[in-house]
Amino acid sequence: MPELPEVETIKRTLQQLVIGKKIKEVEIFWGNIIKHPEDNLQFTVECVGQTIQAIDRRGKFLKFILDDSVLVSHLRMEGRYMVEKANEPYQKHTHVVFSFTDGTELRYMDVRKFGTMHLFPKGTEEKTLPLSKLGVEPFSEEFTPDILREAFQKTTRNIKSILLDQSVVVGLGNIYVDEALFRARIHPEKKAQQLTRSKIEILHNEIKQTLQEAVDKGGSTVRTYVNSQGDMGMFQLNHFVYGKKGDPCTNCGTDIEKTVVAQRGTHFCPECQK
């Protein structure tokens, strides 16, 4: 599933490709992707005639800011957006197509069909699901060590499970939690409420640093992720632990291990993260 760096990269790519374009037609080939309004025809009617004014991101969600509405899109496991000329043949697994008045199309493709789209009146999108219960953005001023400490003291969960919780801090997924915990030298199964204030400050810094470096490199291409221009991310070349089972730790030389934490495959160094 694309995490914050990948979604941020897609957002920035789409900003170059579709802002200012007016929607002429919408074709929906797999209606289950449209979650709100439930009537696909209503979704289509409300989109047509609107211009994409901006594109934003909230956690792992894309926000297409239209004239009167906001389209909230989650890519789930393998969703992708591509911009093509209208006369280009559809690629396999193309499920939603936004045709523009300039003869180009924004096409949503999804092998697993897990992606979602919600269309809300502008200004209401943050007041209802799926955005209403999201936590703090890791690049915002509100994301502080104290915010983490407060959340950690309210739970007996391990540190990995709470960092994956999008109601606490948004955008973190399996890759970047593993990487940030390695950099902070924290075992993924350690109870969050057991972290000292100084360790929380270190973790806070490593979360921000890891995400920023990943954004700078266009995200991580681990399986199928590419941006909306078909380019791979390159941060996977900088992974310390994720996907490195059996490789020597770059810090101490101990083999990286993999286990299951919070129902997710989890990579760590048993020496550096005791």
Image (tube, rainbow, N blue to C red):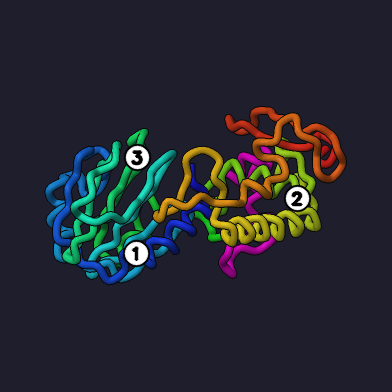
Q: Position of residue 202 (x, y in %)?
A: 76, 57
**Residue positioned 35% across, 42% down in the render:** 115
Q: Check residue 17 in the rendering and tell me which mark sits there, or answer none.
A: 1
Q: Which residue is mark 2?
A: 183
**Quadrant in which residue 70 is drawn:** bottom left
What kind of element bears circle 3? strand
Mark 3 against mark 1, which lies toward the viewer? Answer: 1
Quarter-of-image position of residue 23: bottom left
Q: Earlier in the sequence, mark 2 or mark 3?
A: 3
Q: Marks 2 and 3, how far apart in space?
A: 33 Å
Position of 184 with respect to 259 (left or right) is right
- The segment highlighted magenta reads 139-164
Q: Percent from the top left, x then y, of residue 130?
A: 38, 50
Sequence-wise, the earlier of marks 1 and 2 is: 1
Three-letter amino acid code at the position of disc 3: Asp
Q: Nearer the viewer, residue 11 or 61?
A: 11
How many numbered marks appear?
3
Amino acid type of the residue that numbered disc 1 sits on in the rendered structure: Leu
| Mark 1 → mark 2, Cα distance in angstroms | 36 Å
* Label 1 SS: helix
Q: Quadrant of residue 102?
A: bottom left
Q: Which of label 1 and label 2 is nearer to you?
A: 1
What residue is disc 3 on?
Answer: 110
